[in-house]
Amino acid sequence: MSTLPATEAPSPAPGPTVVVRTVPLDTTDPLLSHLPADHRPDDLLSWVRRGEGIVGWGTALSFESRGPDRFAAAETWWREVARHAVVRDDVGRPGTGLVCFGSFPFAADSAEPARLVVPSTIVGRRDGQTWLTTVSLDPQLTLLETPSVASDPEPPGDVAFSDGDVSPADYAHAVAEAVGRIAAGEVDKVVLARDLVATASGPIDPRWLLRRLAERYENTWVFAVAGLVGATPELLVRRDQGLITSRVLAGTIRRTGDDAKDLALAASLARSSKDLEEHEYAVRSVAEALAPHCSSMNVPEAPFVLHLPNVMHLATDVAAVSADDASSLTLAASLHPSAAVGGTPTARAVELIGELEHMDRGRYAGPVGWMDAQGDGAWGIALRSGALDPADPSQITLYAGCGIVAGSDPESEVAESIAKLIPMRDALASE
C-alpha cells in the first residue's frame, strides 16, 4: 500500500501495470446480492441506487494519503495507474473498464487517511445493462466465471447504543456556542456533528447494512468503502461524458409518519426563512466552486422538497457542462467542504468545527464514491453513515450533523440529529 507524506503531493512515478477485462453479464440478480460472504468487512465496496451502480470486492491495488494535499496525491496516483493499465472493455460505458472506489476524510488534519481501492472484481449495472470487470496485476489474467449470488447475511444480533465523543448534552452546548458565534458575526452558518457508538452481540456484516439501507432508502446512494458504510441522499458531484451534476441538500425537518401532517410540514419547510437561508448558502458554495470548470450552468431559482422515510430536505439539482478535463475527483475536491457540511464562510466555519465539535469526524461528511479511467464518476457526501471498527467486528460508530444558523435552537438540533441517525440505527436491527 502506498502512503504519502502528510503535506506533499507526489511527483509522477511509474504506476503499476494492471490488466483489466470487462464483459457483459446476462443476469438480473440484485447487485448487492453478489457481494461475497467470505471477505473482510473492509474489503467490500458499493455505490448503488435503485438497483443500479457498481459493487466490488477484493483488492488489486490500494492507496492512502493524508493532509491538505490528499486529493491531489490521490489524483496523481490514479492517473499513473490508468496510464499504465492494459484494458479490454467490451461494454464501454462510464463505470466499466478500470475503476476505483474512494473515500476521503472531512478534515485535512484527520487521523483517518484518504483511501482509493481498485477491486479485483466489479459487477455493475446501468440502464438495465450488467457487466463484470476483473482486475489483476498478472498479465496472464483469465476471466473469472460469472459471480454467483452470495449467501444471505446474518443480522448483527442485539445492539446496544452508547454515547460517542459527543453526547446529546455536549452537542446542545456546542450548538448554543455556535449560535452565539453566529450572532457575533464570526460566521453565517456552521455544520456541527455528533457520534453514537453501536455494539452488537455478534459481528456486523456490512452486507446486512447495505441491503437494509437499499430496501428502505431507495432515493439514496448506498455506499461502502474501506469499512465506511452508509446511504447518502446528497450527490456532491457526478461527471458523465461532459455533463456535471450536483444535488445540494440543506434545510431539514423530521417526518411524523402521518401523510397529511408531513405534507403540511413539507410546505412549512419550503417557506421557512431559516431553512431557505441555510439552503441558499449551500447552493451558492457549489455553484461558485463548479463555475471555473464549466461553460454553462443551470441553478434552479427555488429548491424542491426531497421526501425520505425519516426526514425531508430542501434540495436543489445543479447541472452544468464541463469546460475542461477536470476529473470527477478534481471536481469533488473543489467542492469540499461545501456549505452543506462545513458552513459559510467555509474557512472560518471549518475552524469553528475544530473548536466546538471535540471529535475527529474521520471520513464522515467527506467525499465518497468512484471514478473510472476517463475521470467520469460519482462522489457523494458520506452522510447517514457509520465507520466499522477494524479492531472490533461487533462495533460501528454512527455519525449525524446539522446546519446551525442564526435562530437555531439547541434542543431542536439535537432532535434533528437523532432523526438523521435513524437510517443507520434501523439498518442494524434484526427485524
Image (spheres, grey):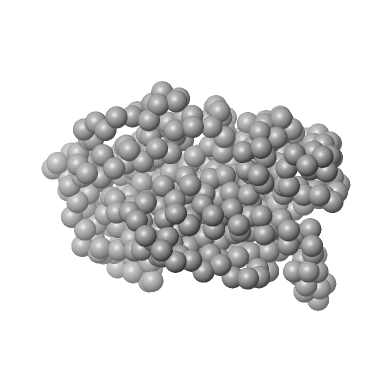
Residue at 17% x, 47% y: name it. 86
Which image quadrant for residue 314? bottom right
Q: Is residue 416 visible?
A: yes
Residue 15, position as x, y percentages in the image = 23, 35
Which image quadrant for residue 107? top right
Report whether 134 appears left or right of 397.
Answer: left
Nearer the observer, 135 or 280: 280
Quadrant of the image for the C terminus?
Answer: bottom right
Up-down: is 117 above or below 47?
above
Nearer the observer, 20 or 300: 300
Residue at far top of view: 5
Residue 183, position as x, y percentages in the image = 83, 43
Q: Is residue 310 visible?
A: no
Residue at 34% x, 56% y: name it. 324
Residue at 81% x, 73% y: name it. 264
Residue at 32% x, 41% y: name it. 78
Up-down: is 274 above or below 64?
below
How many callouts does the rendering have?
Answer: 0
Quadrant of the image for the N terminus?
Answer: top left
Report whether 259 appears left or right of 49.
Answer: right
Residue at far left of view: 140
Residue at far bottom of view: 260
Residue 325, position as x, y percentages in the image = 33, 54
Residue 150, position as x, y percentages in the image = 41, 53
Up-down: is 30 above or below 62?
below
